[in-house]
Amino acid sequence: MAYRNGTYIAFHAEGNTNPTASDIRYYRMIKAWHEHDGVEFRFVNSHEKEEAVKDTASKTVILNSLKKRLDNSKNMILILGPTTKDDTDFVPFEIRYAIDECKIPIIVAYTQYGGIVRPQAHKAEWPAALAARIADGSANVFHIPFKRAAIDDAISRFDVNNQPDGPYIHYTREYQEKNFGVKFK
């Protein structure tokens, strides 16, 4: 049985390795928060627990590596940017495997919004694999803005043994204003 202490981070790379050309920049930002000595942000990155796979590896090799990483994860952050729903291979696979096989909660971190109070209003932005699992009730999902404090708090709250209670869970407006500096109109 896998030791499930990692946080898996899924994002749409859009076939890019350029760190500024896709949502990979948000993944790298999370890694930078983690590595910076002056920032209180700590997590076990599931991507660093397994040996790296070369970009030229076959899709089967990459999927097997992703499975190992997810098997060792206690939760998953899905970085949701404007093109995430367009991903047709790895992000849908990661969502399906995380929810259907690993039974881990999904923390959706929205890059385009300062605060999230009505997750249902963002349905059109979700990848089909997530939307289907939210609709059928099989996903336990926590919706947050892409903010360091929100991500850190969500990682510490939710894991395979302490799941959000349903698919539309989010922080209250007041909690986001007080703890994350969110300004709602």
Image (spheres, rainbow, N blue to C red):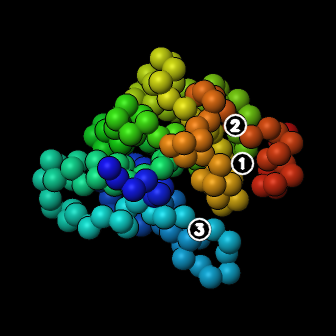
Upstream in the sequence, badge 1 or badge 3? 3
Give x and y (percent) for residue 83: 45, 42
Q: Is residue 91 visible?
A: yes
- The correct choice, above or below, for 184 with respect to 19 in the image is above
Badge 1 marks a residue whose secondary structure is loop
Q: What is the residue that sits farthest to the front in this orientation?
A: 1
Q: Which residue is mark 2?
A: 170
Instruction: Indicate the amino acid at tag 1.
Output: Gly
Q: Which residue is mark 1?
A: 114
Instruction: Indicate the amino acid at tag 3.
Output: Arg
Residue drawn 37% across and 67% down?
A: 48
Upstream in the sequence, badge 3 or badge 2? 3
Q: Is residue 110 visible?
A: no
Q: Nearer the viewer, residue 25 or 6?
A: 6
Q: What is the residue that sits farthest to the top in this orientation?
A: 136
Q: Nearer the viewer, residue 90 or 137?
A: 137
Q: Which residue is mark 3?
A: 42
Q: CA distance from mark 3 to mark 2?
A: 21 Å
Badge 3 marks a residue whose secondary structure is loop
- Nearer the observer, disc 3 or disc 2? 3
